[in-house]
């Protein structure tokens, strides 16, 4: 043992002799966002290595998809990223529509944008609040949930469910909006807008928050691309990519005519950054603070998109049309489509043999890739940084394990 | 009312006759001694620390009983605080199982017994050789005050000057002994830290460093985590095994 | 009281003293236990209000007054669990060690002029020393629990509390120096009169050091943002992870007891103790020195004053807890070693210089002769003969400090 230590070239530091300890963080742990299990190799407070163990929430959703028709599988997509179920519905619906070369009505398109962006706000609110919780402050979590509840109220009015909506479906949406909904949605946006400043005061600019997040878990641009990170994690590292702008035609067509700027730092500036608190001096691109901040920016961006969608939707005449029937046959072939879900690029793959039931169904989860980079980020950090880093990746286990 | 209570008092005469000062003195002294012995007999570092704290706490109680509140509080603060640090170091530095659970051999016991008995003999001898300590103090002791002690620690004696010394001449205080003791403690601390040092793998702190250090072979060890096996054992499992 | 029992009721001496001791102990115990009940309820209500919730509303009427009591009954009824690998004796003992330390410190805390369990002439020192013992229970609990999270919590607590005792001690020494006594009663009495007499407003240095004290006090009782020992998002529940039921509630009571204690200590040391901001009693011509009803009333008023100030301190701690994120362990140590300790030392030196330069203080009037302030130092058996060397020594110390 001693000689092995002497020969090891890595051993260059004289210090008090301590032992390493393996600690299980999770699957039952307050800050692992569900049933993630992280094995930490710690030396005192310093974590030398973490290893995520997944699979505790596996429900064979993809296999189930191969025994149901495309529309019947929509409820299973709800349960993937259950914090942004609308975006999951949209991803699957668009993939099947791509294979079927189906185009929804203009009104349904705008309604889809409206709903998807509202869902993005809800998801980012949870991500933001839960991140505060990871850092030990409880109140912003409830402030975020208070506003999210209002979005859920709107969703409940539209489709009857508060969490698993199955609202956006293959061929359109299950129902049109009830009367007066748009007014209530606008009222919510007007009421919500000033509250974002409060979030910035409580978290983004809070000195302790900045100390806990700035220069912690720095994810370099190259590493982010290598690991296939996407969404706010990728954009937080300064990579200018957003499927809503850079994705496939069938997806970007949905956002045709919408004006939005991808929330990414360019030349040291975020879009419209004069409206937000300045980037703290300690923060470097790709750290936890930037990932968090990108989410905050996207909330504002989505509010803007929702407002545009409301205008366009109300300008459309006619109805949103009927969705495809439950047993609609899918033409033989395969299709893969990635959409920009709140957590990143959510891909669905479908292979059909011409029957109503797909032959193969697969999903590509953004949280999975985002979580995969966690061991790189956590190497050499402190125990308290592990929740801070994993929290900043904003993962949802339902999506990783499917 | 008062009559009844007085009768009650008379019935439990033995209690009234008891010298409460002596009773508490014996109580604290017994606790101190018993815990001191328990420190020696215990074989677990943390339990030893607990007994040590109890023993020192009981000694502080003796000080309070004697009216030396300053020394008593000092005893609590320094010794109990010191034991805490000792405990932390004890657990941190002796994380390996053989040290957390210390088994003394018969030879150790004999050696310790001889040394201890010798020390006790010296102390007793010196204690009884002071004539003034062999008879009870005459008259009442002045109300204790912390000020003279505090001033004396700063090097100024404000208590009664020694007999025959000229007016204004100041006896030296405890500043020098105080400093000597503190320097001595510092030396001990540095020495302990030096002894505890060992070669150790450099802990990668930043990502750049981490990138150059290949991760330890982990998969097999991690797989063993659930069964409590693996190279890295915890203090706890070590202490219990 | 003992004298009263002996002289008026004719009790034997030993019985009188025993009764006195028991009554005092029960009173103090009730202050802690009753205080904990009230504060837990208050914390729930305050947290709820901060977070836009209602908090308890049903148990015991509209405001949920009885919520803490109901909680207590629940805790009593809970199964008392002990982990299999735990060190049984230490595991059972630890909560009582914590609680006893918190309880013992109350012995020397004066609530009003002579409402004090045991007036010690080293009261400040005793309180700080005994308060430091509380951490011992925490360490025992952390070690004995046979849980790695508990051990982490205990080690953090040990490092944190031992470090913070240094600046805390320095802060506490300042009022001691100003009053010339370590007796809490004397310190408070020296601040009698208008609030300008409080040591908080004695000079700029004491004002700063008060805030250093507040920081260190919050840290030494383990409240957010320094609640690392039980950081729920990192260490599950830290040192009390494995505790349940009544044992757990002892830790809780110890925590609230300590919170109240450091707040009361702040009130006595810096905010005049039982002397209100406006000397109502003095204006009315009443004095606490008399043993009649008026004197008793004055003392009750003083006690209300002290309890009010201490409660204010506790409420501020709750406010802070529900607002700020948690610091990381290295940041906590940095705060202590790099900021609090040097600041406290500098302020300590500053107060000394101020005492020499402006002995009466600005607010209290420059006309006051220096000797009067310093008189307390010289009340030794040496009398006037020793006064000159003592003053010389004080001067020398101040010169060194300069």
Image (spheres, rainbow, N blue to C red):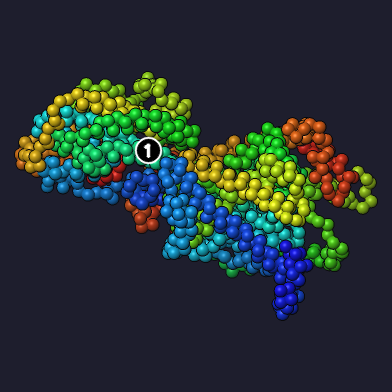
Residue at 65%, 65% in the rendered image: C22
- A328 or A61, which is in the foreground? A328
Please indicate, yes or no, whether residue B110 appears anywhere in the rendered image. yes
In the rendered image, residue A167, in percent from the top left (x then y), is placed at: 19, 39
In the rendered image, residue A394, in percent from the top left (x then y), is placed at: 34, 38
Q: Mark 1, chain letter?
A: A
Q: Which residue is mark 1?
A: A144
Left-right relation of A69 to C290: left
- B3 or A227, which is in the foreground? B3
Residue at 53%, 49% in the rendered image: C157
In the rendered image, residue A131, in percent from the top left (x then y), is placed at: 39, 39
Tell me if residue A229 comes above or below residue A398 in the rendering.
Answer: above
Q: Residues within 10 Å of mark 1 (few under 14, many from 20)?
A: many
Left-right relation of B158 to C133: right
Left-right relation of A193 to C133: left
Quadrant for the C terminus of chain A in the image: top left
Left-right relation of C71 to C111: left
Please indicate, yes or no, whether residue B33 appears anywhere in the rendered image. no
In the rendered image, residue A130, in percent from the top left (x then y), is placed at: 38, 41
């Amino acid at each position: 043992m001693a000689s092995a230590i002497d020969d090891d070239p890595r051993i260059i530091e004289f210090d008090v002799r301590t032992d390493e300890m393996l600690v299980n963080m999770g699957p039952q742990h307050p800050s692992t966002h569900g049933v993630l299990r992280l094995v930490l190799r710690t030396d005192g407070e310093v974590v030398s290595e973490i290893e995520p163990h997944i699979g505790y929430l596996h429900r064979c959703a993809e296999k189930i998809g191969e025994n149901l028709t495309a529309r019947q599988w929509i409820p299973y997509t709800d349960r993937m990223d259950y914090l942004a179920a609308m975006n999951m519905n949209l991803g699957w619906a668009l993939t099947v529509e791509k294979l079927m070369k189906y185009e929804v009505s203009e009104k349904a398109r705008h309604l889809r944008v409206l709903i998807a962006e509202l869902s993005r706000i809800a998801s980012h609110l949870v991500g933001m609040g839960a991140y505060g919780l990871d850092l030990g402050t409880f109140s912003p979590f409830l402030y975020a949930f208070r506003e999210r509840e209002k979005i859920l109220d709107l969703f409940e009015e539209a489709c009857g469910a508060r969490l698993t909506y199955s609202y956006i479906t293959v061929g359109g949406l299950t129902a049109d909006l009830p009367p007066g909904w748009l007014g209530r949605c606008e009222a919510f946006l007007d009421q919500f807008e000033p509250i974002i400043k409060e979030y910035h005061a409580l978290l983004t600019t809070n000195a302790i928050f900045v100390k806990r997040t700035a220069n912690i878990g720095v994810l370099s641009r190259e590493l982010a691309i290598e690991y296939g990170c996407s969404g706010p994690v990728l954009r937080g590292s300064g990579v200018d990519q957003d499927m809503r702008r850079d994705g496939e035609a069938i997806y970007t067509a949905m956002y045709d005519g919408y004006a939005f700027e991808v929330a990414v730092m360019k030349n040291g500036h975020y879009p419209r950054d004069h409206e937000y608190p300045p980037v703290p001096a300690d923060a470097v691109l790709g750290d936890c603070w930037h990932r968090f901040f990108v989410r905050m920016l996207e909330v504002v961006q989505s509010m803007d998109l929702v407002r545009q969608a409301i205008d366009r939707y109300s300008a459309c005449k006619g109805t949103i049309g009927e969705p495809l029937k439950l047993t609609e046959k899918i033409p033989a072939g395969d299709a893969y489509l990635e959409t920009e879900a709140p957590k990143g690029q959510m891909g669905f793959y479908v292979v059909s043999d011409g029957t109503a039931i797909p032959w193969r169904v697969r999903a590509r989860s953004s949280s999975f890739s985002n979580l995969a980079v966690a061991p790189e980020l956590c190497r050499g950090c402190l125990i308290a940084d592990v929740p801070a880093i994993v929290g900043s990746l904003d993962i949802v286990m339902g999506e990783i394990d499917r | 009312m008062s009559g009844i209570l007085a009768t009650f008092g008379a019935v439990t005469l033995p209690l009234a006759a008891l010298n409460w000062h002596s009773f508490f003195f014996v109580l604290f002294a017994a606790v101190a001694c018993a815990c001191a012995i328990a420190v020696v007999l215990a074989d677990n570092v943390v339990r030893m620390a607990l007994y040590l704290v109890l023993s020192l706490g009981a000694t502080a109680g003796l000080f309070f009983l004697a009216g030396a509140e300053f020394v008593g509080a000092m005893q609590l603060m320094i010794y109990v605080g010191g034991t805490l640090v000792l405990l932390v170091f004890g657990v941190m530095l002796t994380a390996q199982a053989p040290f957390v659970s210390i088994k003394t051999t018969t030879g150790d016991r004999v050696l310790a017994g001889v040394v201890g008995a010798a020390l006790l003999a010296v102390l007793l001898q010196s204690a009884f050789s002071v004539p003034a300590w062999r008879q009870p103090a005459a008259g009442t002791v002045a109300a204790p005050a912390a000020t003279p002690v505090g001033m004396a620690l700063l090097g100024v004696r404000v208590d009664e000057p020694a007999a025959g010394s000229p007016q204004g001449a100041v006896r030296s205080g405890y500043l020098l002994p105080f400093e000597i003791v503190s320097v001595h403690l510092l030396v001990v601390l540095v020495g302990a830290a030096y002894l505890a040092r060992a070669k150790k793998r450099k802990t990668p702190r930043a990502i750049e460093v981490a990138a150059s250090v290949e991760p330890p072979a982990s998969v097999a060890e991690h797989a063993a985590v659930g069964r409590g096996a693996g190279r890295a054992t915890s203090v706890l499992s070590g202490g219990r095994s | 009281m003992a004298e009263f029992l002996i002289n008026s009721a004719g009790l034997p001496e030993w019985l009188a003293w025993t009764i006195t001791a028991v009554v005092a102990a029960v009173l103090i115990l009730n202050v802690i236990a009753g205080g904990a009940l009230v504060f837990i309820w208050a914390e729930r209500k305050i947290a709820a209000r901060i977070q836009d919730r209602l908090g308890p509303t049903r148990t015991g009427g509209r405001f949920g007054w009885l919520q803490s009591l109901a909680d207590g009954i629940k805790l009593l009824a809970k199964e008392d669990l002990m982990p299999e690998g735990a060190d049984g004796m230490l595991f059972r003992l630890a909560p009582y060690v914590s609680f006893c330390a918190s309880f013992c410190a109350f012995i020397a805390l004066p609530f009003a002029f002579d409402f004090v369990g045991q007036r010690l002439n080293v009261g400040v020192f005793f309180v700080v020393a005994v308060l430091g013992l509380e951490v011992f229970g925490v360490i025992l609990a952390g070690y004995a629990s046979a849980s790695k999270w508990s051990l982490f919590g205990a080690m953090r607590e040990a490092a944190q509390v031992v470090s913070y005792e240094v600046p805390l001690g320095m802060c506490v020494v300042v009022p001691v120096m100003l009053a010339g006594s370590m007796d809490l009663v004397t310190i408070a009495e020296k601040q009698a009169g208008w609030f300008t007499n409080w040591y908080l407003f004695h000079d700029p240095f004491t004002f700063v050091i008060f805030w250093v004290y507040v920081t260190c006090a919050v840290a030494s009782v383990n409240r957010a943002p320094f609640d690392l020992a039980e950081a729920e998002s990192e260490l599950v529940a830290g040192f009390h992870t494995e505790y349940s039921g009544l044992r757990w509630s002892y830790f809780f009571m110890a925590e609230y007891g300590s919170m109240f204690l450091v707040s009361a200590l702040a009130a006595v040391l810096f905010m005049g103790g039982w002397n209100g901001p406006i000397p109502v009693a003095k204006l009315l011509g009443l004095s606490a020195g008399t043993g009649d009803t008026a004197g008793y009333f004055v003392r009750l008023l003083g006690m209300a004053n002290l309890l009010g100030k201490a409660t204010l301190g506790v409420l501020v701690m709750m406010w802070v807890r529900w607002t700020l994120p948690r610091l990381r362990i290295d940041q906590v140590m940095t705060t202590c070693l790099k900021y609090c300790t040097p600041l406290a030392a500098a302020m300590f030196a500053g107060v000394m210089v101020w005492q020499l330069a402006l002995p009466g203080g600005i607010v209290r009037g420059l006309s006051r002769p220096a000797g009067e302030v310093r008189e307390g130092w010289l009340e030794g058996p040496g009398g006037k003969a020793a006064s000159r060397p003592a003053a010389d020594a004080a001067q020398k110390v101040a010169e060194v400090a300069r």
